[in-house]
Image: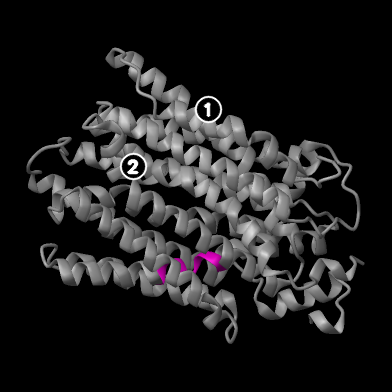
Amino acid sequence: MIPNKAVEKLSVFEKVGFSSGDAACNLLFNPITMFLAFFYTDIYGINAGVVASIFLLVRVIDAFFDPLYGAMIDKTKSRWGRYRPWMLWCAVPFTISCMMMFYTPDLGPNAKIIYAFFTYLLLSLLYSAVNIPFCSLGCVITGNARERVSCQQYRCIAGAVAGLFCTFTLLPLVQYFGGGNRQTGFFWVVTLYSVLALVLFVFCFRTTRERVEPQNENNDGILTNLKNALKNDQLIVCSLGMFLDCFPSFVRGAVAIYFAKYIMHLNDWMSTLFMSLGIVAGIIGCLITPLFTRYFCKVAVYKYVKLCLVALSLALYLIDPLNQTFIFSFYFVLSVVHLTSAPILWSFVGDADDYGEWKLKKRMAGLCASSNLFTLKVSLAVSGALVGGILSLYGYVPDAAQQSESAVSGIYLLMAGIPAAGYAASWILFQFFYKLDRQTMGRIEHELFTVSEGTK
């Protein structure tokens, strides 16, 4: 049995420390998901179709490295644990790679494409080296199912705050640092974000502990562990769920600036306010998650949220985009509902790891985290390629004063129709294939952990 410290109640300070790791990731991940397509097409001058191809190819290559990362990280042994050291070792090269990606050397058209491809690939590989250990830490920081949801709530709030900071400050700071030159402005803003992220990674490392240790030391080889992970059916469901859950978010997040500029006809400041409002709403969504999971099974809550999001997404087609007051309010509600399910989704990763140890007698937190990051990146690849591909297919013209009716239809499809389909597919998956509900996890926790009266 694992000792009681594995399920003890965590301090608020440690939860804040844990959440700072996600804040660090989002300080740099947010500009990538929300602005990179726009940066490549409208600032660096790369064709939207080419951008779509870069996104797809890089993310597919990168994603297949993640399970290998996870298996290797699980084998790490140090006085600081298995996962925390990786965040410390890889934080500096990761932040430097972010700066390189937003640096725009004066190159010819083909050289620009090559530079964009290799810098984006380097960043993606290094992101895995810090994010997989961080996600793995969420599996082993506690074995208490309720504390695990609480940690993920803190994490999602911190990530959303970091995303809000980026969204609210990026375009104004680009103008300030660039003095009208947006290429220069983007580079110095991302450099500032990189320094802040480095500080947060170190803070996360110093303030957290790894409490859950495997009952049986896993001495299997990397390939054997990869095969064993495939036997964890709930991990597979969870990983597919990560793809389907992130897909609407990535698509809508990438196209939001296009929607604000070309459909709502907002200037840079109002576009920033529109996107920032969505992130503020997301923070509120994370805050209210425990109001539901305290009284209802978190799996049921997750599924009902997905159904609500299908309806809300399709309703975007019915709203007058020029009625700013109403559409701002509607987007706020949509974002609240969307982020309500985020802490629940990430807690599923730890639950799948517990289930794997309970079923297979092997704990593989790194592989669990990396498998979910794998599908998250595939989702990012597909969504990024889809955004670029649909914009190109529907005749989008970068930085045009007015878009064609066809281009407007493509933006609406990305903003409403495709996210609705993603939410619906997510509901189907968890309705019919996910079985780690409150009752099941209670039995697994009871059999895995020695729980004291004070932590039950």
x 32%, y 56%: residue: 418
The location of residue 286, given as percent across then percent down, is 49, 69
Q: Is residue 433 above or below residue 67?
A: below
The residue indicated by pointer 2 is: 35
The answer to whether residue 41 is above or below residue 263 is above
Quarter of the image with the C terminus in it: bottom right
Earlier sequence position, callout 2 versus callout 1: 2
User: Of all residues shown, which one is farthest toward the bottom?
Assistant: 295
Q: Secondary structure at mark 2?
A: helix
Circle 2: residue type:
Phe
Residue of label 1: 122
Residue drawn at 57 percent across, 60 percent down: 155
Q: x, y (%) of residue 381?
A: 44, 40
Q: Is 69 left, or right, of 189 in this rendering?
A: right
Q: Is residue 444 left or right of residue 166?
A: right
Q: CA distance from mark 2 to mark 1?
A: 18 Å
Instruction: Specify start and end residues of the magenta stretch as a single range.
Output: 337-344
- Given residues 386 and 296, the one toward you in this image is 296
Magenta span main SS: helix
Colour mode of the rendering: one colour
